[in-house]
Amino acid sequence: MLFSPIIEKMGAIIAEITAFLRELFSKAVAFFPNLREQIRNGHFWREYRKPAAVAAVIITAILLLAGLGALLTPGSGGAAKNRPDGTVAPETSVQFYIPPDELFLPDEPDFVPGVMTEREKRSAWTEEYAETWWSDPLENGGHNWLGQIEKTADEILESVP
């Protein structure tokens, strides 16, 4: 079987744990009936006085530190905290405040200045009005484009059988 070595090891470990717990339980059974007699005779207090005193001092120190920590912690007074913008934060909120202008990116600028994205619709155009919307491409070095466009058109027309 595939898992038989693992099962055998687990059985050995369980047997060891059972033997340890039996020994621990037998010691506890032997200790507790004698505990009453040891307390009455004073033998218990003579034997365990120093460890009990050390444990009491440690527990007292832990409780004192916990109490001082609770008193000195900011926000433990229970009063509501005022935010910089004048609102009152509830008691369960975090102790710091981030203004929205630092938290979010600023708005991006609008369209490029000087560009109209739309125009008024007219039934008739005057020559002056048309000049504001028209720029002649040949005036700004458009002759190169014109030659390239004619060449490309000629190549397309010649390639068709």
Image (cartoon, helix red, strand yellow):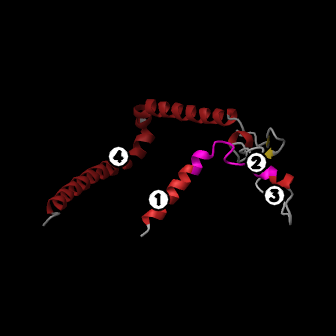
Q: Amino acid at mark 1?
A: Glu
Q: Residue 155 appears at what percent x and percent y?
A: 46, 59
Is residue 116 located in the magenta-colored stretch of the structure? no
Could you tell which of marks 4 and 1 lies nearer the N-terminus?
Answer: 4
**Above or below for 100 versus 60:** below
Q: Mark 1 sits on what residue?
A: 155
Of circles 4 and 1, the one toward us is 1
Distance, label 4 to label 1, CA atoms, is 110 Å
Q: Residue 151 appears at what percent x and percent y?
A: 51, 54
Which structural element holds mark 3? Answer: loop
Of circles 2 and 1, the one toward us is 1
**Closest to the observer, 136 or 11:** 136
Q: Residues within 10 Å of mark 4 (few under 14, many from 20)?
A: few
Distance, label 2 to label 4, CA atoms, is 96 Å
Could you tell which of marks 2 and 4 lies nearer the N-terminus?
Answer: 4
In this rendering, would 63 be left or right of 120? left
**Closest to the observer, 88 or 68:** 88
| Number of marks drawn | 4
**Closest to the observer, 117 or 56:** 117
Q: Please report the residue visible at 81 percent of the width from the left and 51 percent of the height from the top.
A: 131
* Position of the C terminus by quadrant: bottom left
Label number found at residue 139: none
Distance, label 3 to label 4, CA atoms, is 101 Å
Q: Mark 2 sits on what residue?
A: 115
Q: Which residues, given as a range, are shown in magenta?
A: 131-146
